[in-house]
Image (cartoon, helix red, strand yellow):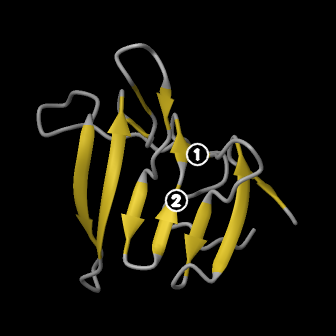
């Protein structure tokens, strides 16, 4: 399947560890070999933009952000609720819909 996602691989959950071998947490800067910069968000070691307020309300943010490119991930899987786009690419002109790592054609 063709996708504009930077990290999606079939049947793969995206996880990362920090420099001490612990599950990655928070925001990290990722620089591609061509010099493009992307901010990646991790939660419990998974590529995941979600966070929660003190009262438990879900806050959905992109897990991957760069110039003209955004991706929404939940627990290491491409995902966005509510029928919204999970991937915006090529200056936001390309949109892809994903639920739990499965692409939804529109």
Helix, strand or loop at label 1? It is loop
Crowd around label 1: few <14 · some 14–19 · many ≥20 (10 Å): few
Mark 1 to mark 2: distance in Å?
Answer: 16 Å
Q: Mark 1 points at which residue?
A: 12
Q: Quadrant of residue 56?
A: top left
Q: In which quarter of the image is the C terminus?
A: bottom right
* Name of the residue lying farthest toward the left: 20
The residue that mark 2 highlights is 71
Across and down, in percent, residue 94 comes to: 65, 79
Residue positioned 67% across, 59% down in the render: 85
Counting from the top left corner in percent of width and height, residue 98 is at: 71, 53
Q: Is mark 2 on a helix, strand or loop?
A: strand
Which one is nearer the viewer's eye here, 82 or 24? 82
Q: Residue furthest front?
A: 55
Residue at the image position 34 percent from the left and 16 percent from the top: 54
Q: Where on the picture, by quarter, is residue 43?
A: top left
């Amino acid at each position: 399947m063709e996708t504009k996602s930077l990290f999606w691989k079939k049947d793969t959950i995206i996880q990362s560890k920090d420099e001490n071998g612990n599950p990655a947490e928070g925001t990290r800067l990722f620089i591609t070999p061509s010099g493009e910069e992307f901010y990646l968000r991790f939660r419990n070691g998974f590529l995941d933009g979600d966070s929660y307020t003190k009262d438990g309300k879900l806050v959905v943010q992109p897990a991957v952000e760069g110039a003209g490119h955004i991706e929404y991930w939940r627990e290491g899987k491409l995902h966005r609720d509510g029928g919204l786009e999970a991937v915006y690419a090529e200056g936001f002109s390309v949109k892809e819909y994903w639920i739990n790592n499965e692409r939804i054609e529109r």
